[in-house]
Image (tube, rainbow, N blue to C red):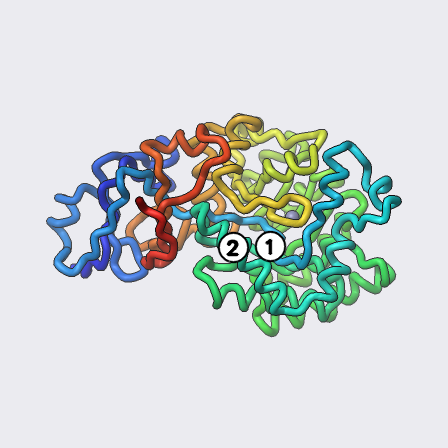
Amino acid sequence: MAQITAIVENAGQVLTCADDAPDLVGASQHTVVAISGAEIAATGTLAEIAAGHDLSAAERIDAHGGLVMPGFVDCHTHLVFHKSRVEEYAQKVRGRSADEIRAMGIPVGITATARMMREATKEQLVASAAERLEHMLACGTTTVESKSGYGLNTATEIKMLEVNQLLGKRQPIEIVSTFLGAHEFPDDKDRDAYITEIMDEMIPEVARRGLAEFNDVYCDDGYYTVAETRAILQRGLEHGLKIKIHTDAYSHIGGSTLAAEMKAVSADHMNYTDPSEYALLREAGVVCVVMPALDFAVGHTRPFDARAMLDAGVTLALATDMCPGCWLESMPFVVQLACRLYKFSPAEAIRAGTLHAARALKREDRIGSLETGKQADIAVFPYERYEDMAYRLGRGRASLVMKAGNVVFDERV
Ligand SMILES: [Zn+2]
């Protein structure tokens, strides 16, 4: 009989987000979550739990009538960067193009962030990313994927991944590290020479030092071709790096078909994905990661068609895409945009930001739902019911967050 170390009780509603939940979120009332160490021991009524477990040493954690759910999993971010690009954003919202903004002397885009990245020390990068992670935690996020890709040379890409490692040790959110050397092309090196550097220097070094779990490529018009993407991802596979793809954001060159062919863990963006590819992605088990806030921040002229993908049975995950072009820490805001602009139901959106996002990081056996044996990553929000997550616009601050059974954020009143 497991020793229960903590019980989260007095919830208005508990969401399990279990895989087989008929309503997608497993909503129930009069439910408590029993925790044993870092894991969830059981969910059920207090009487049910008391019948099968020793509660004598359990800390009682009062949810104050709030919504108790799995911590959000933010499965696509570019969290590590040095300085903002606020001047670029302020001009873009006025309708100016990248070329016009560049002509004004304002640094623009990934290459601008890459220049700033090369000057930054590891400690500066850790400090700025940690500040953003603090906001993410306050919004109920307990796991964050973080990509390199602003280095665009071996030393700086490695530096970014070392920052991911340090962040994982210095604050409570779990960091999932992704190598994205193929994010752009550097402006100081020939295209083929850079691809050779990625394949022959960066990938072996990243794998040897265990600095990343995933290998990601920006496969789109103006970025990496399908053939280049395949070669880079294949080299990563040979070194044990799992596959992610940025694709179909601004064109349709076949990245989604490649994602299905290579059985990528996730394919991300999907604005130009052809409906004929939905079945390929579904059958290959590729999770499609969509990012409403990125479309919002760039004023995308072709929003992704989430409803069509959901209706075709594609597994969708939601993420912030936190980056200098889309400065967003809040998964609740992503849920709000997904529901109002992309026709997700609130239940579909919450599941996409928890269990499906865990699947996009190959962690669905450990996080993303509140089920026996899973890690006790729990967020409590001051809402009576989960639809409030979509309804209360601009809100989304958690009242309590637990990571692996420990209270790591507490603003209960
Ligand atoms: Zn991205």
Residue annotated with mark 2: 133
Where does the image place residue 115, in percent across and percent down from the top left?
A: 77, 60
Mark 2 residue element: helix
Do the residues under discs 1 and 2 have CB atoms within 8 angstroms?
A: yes
Quadrant where the N terminus sits is bottom left
Question: Dot 2, how many residues are within 10 Å of its Cα: few (below 14), some (14-19), or many (20+)?
Answer: many
> Does residue 284 appear anywhere in the picture?
no
**Discs 1/2, front:** 2
- Tell me the amino acid under the disc marked 2: Leu
Residue annotated with mark 1: 79
Query: Which residue corresponds to the image point at 73% horizontal and 66% vertical from the top-left?
Result: 119
Question: Dot 1, how many residues are within 10 Å of its Cα: few (below 14), some (14-19), or many (20+)?
Answer: many
Corner quadrant of residue 341: top right
Nearest to the observer: residue 398 or residue 288: 398
Label 1 – label 2 distance at C-alpha: 8 Å
Corner quadrant of residue 384: top left
Q: Relative to 257, does residue 362 appear above or below in the rendering?
A: below
- Tell me the amino acid under the disc marked 1: Leu
Where does the image place residue 403, in percent across and percent down from the top left?
A: 38, 56
Where does the image place residue 353, in percent across and percent down from the top left?
A: 47, 42
